[in-house]
Amino acid sequence: MYERLSNIFPDKGLEKLHKANILLAGVGGVGSFCFETLIRSGILNITIIDFDVYENSNLNRQLHSKESNIGKKKVAVLKKEALSINKNLNIKVIDAFIGENSNIDITGYDYIIDAVDNINAKCYLIAKALENNQKIICAMGIAKRKEPSKVKVTTLDKTFGDPLAKKLRYELKKRNIKDKIKVVFSEEKPLASKTLSSYMAVTAYAGILLADTVIKDIINE
């Protein structure tokens, strides 16, 4: 199924992707598109973590969310869908909530992708990744935005206008974590509204950009 990628990723690029082992935390709006891009682009070994089920509010932006999946576990649905695309995938699922006191083993992965929206979960993943000398990339706030072109890859210290990124910087500083953390964030100022809102074009682009960054990093190692 990867014949159309062989010329795009030459010089053993596909081989590197096939051998890589990825951990993806969070398979919602951003994470689901990240996941789909990874498995269709040569990643064969992947573990996904999420505790949530599909809800009606997910239908406007989350890949694989449909009325027939309402109430079903996201990790279970994504695994089934992924294996229908490529039966040779080595996909593992962890149905769990990530918190500050989690005891999830994240060792053994070449890359950790954080697509969760919980600050404590992000701090946990970052701290563990740094402790184990693993690569990590984190998604920042994507909701309440409407311009996909404003989504960029940078480091956490260079983000601006993002309340989630600001909070994460504060929490990491309290934990004396000063490393430059690679992130995907939007330069667009979020809407000044308390109403929950998300636009699929933005969440999808952020997820694809997460995956693309990881793919290119693995190939260029």
Image (cartoon, rainbow, N blue to C red):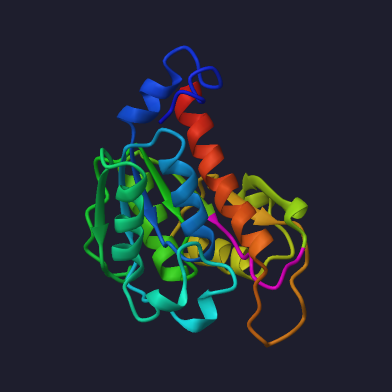
Q: Total of numbered circles in the picture?
A: 0
| Residue at image point 38% right, 52% down | 24
Q: Is residue 127 left or right of residue 177?
A: left
Up-down relation of residue 216 to residue 38 (above or below) = above
**Magenta part mainly helix, strand or loop?**
loop
Q: State the image coordinates of residue 44 (x, y, percent, origin top left).
A: 32, 37
| Residue at image point 52% right, 60% down | 173
Q: Which residues are magenta?
A: 139-146
Q: State the image coordinates of residue 69 (x, y, percent, origin top left).
A: 38, 74
Q: Is residue 54 visible?
A: no
Q: Is residue 7 left or right of residue 77?
A: right
* Residue lying at the far bottom of the rendered structure: 194
| Residue at image point 55% right, 53% down | 207
Up-down relation of residue 29 to residue 10 (above or below) = below
Nearest to the observer: residue 83 or residue 220: 83
Q: Is residue 165 left or right of residue 150?
A: left
Q: State the image coordinates of residue 56 (x, y, percent, origin top left).
A: 50, 83
Q: State the image coordinates of residue 8 (x, y, percent, origin top left).
A: 56, 21
Up-down relation of residue 34 to residue 66 (above or below) = above
| Residue at image point 76% right, 54% down | 150
The N terminus sits in image quarter: top left
